[in-house]
Image (cartoon, coloured by chain):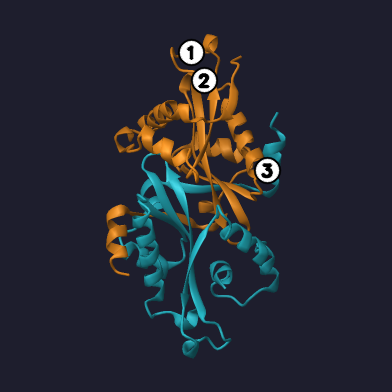
Amino acid sequence: MAHYKLRKAEPEDVTDILRLIKELAKIVEKEDQVMLTEKDLLEDGFGEHPFYHCIVAEVPAEQQKVEGYSVIGFAMYYFTYDPWIGKLLYLEDFFVMKEYRCLGIGSEILKNLSVTALKSGCHSMHFIVAQSNEASINFYKRRGALDLSLAEGWRLFRIDKQCLLNLSAEE
Amino acid sequence: ELAIYERMPDQLINNCFFSFILVTIIELERDGFSQNPFYHCLVAEVPETHKSTEGHTTVGYVLYYYTYSTWKGRCIYMEDLYVMPDFRERGIGKSLVASIAKVGTEQQCMHLQFSVLDWNKPSLDFYMSKGAQDLTAKEGWHLLRFDGVALIKLAQEAP
C-alpha cells in the first residue's frame, strides 16, 4: 500500500501542479488548450487574494513509481456563493496520476475537501463532470452527490473573451 | 423574487417554499462587504420619481464572483441576474450583463460562465444571441453537488 500525505500546496509546487493539469488535459486530448503558466499559478494562487486553493498528494522518495515525481495528485478549489444558502466550495480540478490510482487517494482527497468545506462554513460542494465520464459520475453518486443538471435542469453556459469584449462595448 | 421565478414560474406563491432561502441579511452583509468578499454585486437603480408601486428604487441586480480555470486562469461567474417584472423590456437586464462583461474584461478574466434552467427560454435565447455556448448540450457537462447530509457523511469518513 502506498504511503502518501495530503497537504496544502506551497509556491514551490506550481511546477508539479502545472504538470498534473497538463496530464489531465492530455487524457481528454486538450493539452494544447492549457494556457496557464507557472507564473500565472504563482501569482493567482499565492498572492494576497488567491483566486484558488490547492491540496496535493505527495509520496516519499522511496515510494515513487515514476522517477522524479513525488507530487502525484492534486485538487484545486475555490469558494463561491449561492444567495439562497451562502458560501460553497467549488472543486475545479481533481486528479491522481494513473500509477497511483485505486489506492484510495482520490477518496481521501474528496473527504479532505469536504472537511475543509464544513470548517469554512460552506453548505455545499459543487463541481462539474462530463456526462461521458461515467466512472467519475458513479464515483461521486456512490458518495451521495446529486446531479443538478438531471435533477433540476441546470445547464452550464460560457461566454468567451471576444464575445465578452463585444458585450462590454454595448454597455 | 428570483427564487420564486426559478422554482415556480407559472404557479402561485407557496409560502413553504421560502424555507429554501437560508441566507440572512446579516450573512449577505458579512460575506459580500468584508475585506475578502465571497461575492460582488451590481444593482440597477431608478430615480425616486420612477420607483416601483411598493416604493423600491433598486429594481435589479447581478451577483457574481471570480473563479479559476486550470486551463485559462482567472474567470468570472454570474450567479444571479434579476430585474423586477415591472421594469423589464427596458434594456436593464442587457445593461447588467454588459456591465459584468466589462468587469470581467477589466479584471483580465478569460471567460464568463453561468447556469440557466433548461425551461427558461427567454434567457436561453438572450444569452445565445450574445455568443454564449451551452456547455451542457455541446460538451456534456453536468453540475453535481454534495450538500447537507451527504457532505457531512463524506467528512465523517475522513481519518
Chain A colour is orange
- The answer to which of marks 3 and 1 sits earlier in the sequence is 1
Question: Which quadrant, please, contains the C terminus of chain B?
Answer: top right
- Residue at image point 57% right, 60% down: B33
Numbered disc 3: secondary structure: helix
Q: Please name the residue that numbered disc 1 is placed on.
A: A65
Q: Is residue B83 visible?
A: no
- Residue at image point 50% right, 44% down: A48
Chain B colour is cyan
Three-letter code, disc 3: Lys
**CA–CA distance in space, label 1 to label 2:** 8 Å
Q: Residue A91: percent from the left, percent from the top?
A: 52, 42
Q: Please name the residue that numbered disc 2 is placed on.
A: A100
Q: Is residue A43 visible?
A: yes
- Chain containing mark 3: A
Three-letter code, disc 1: Lys
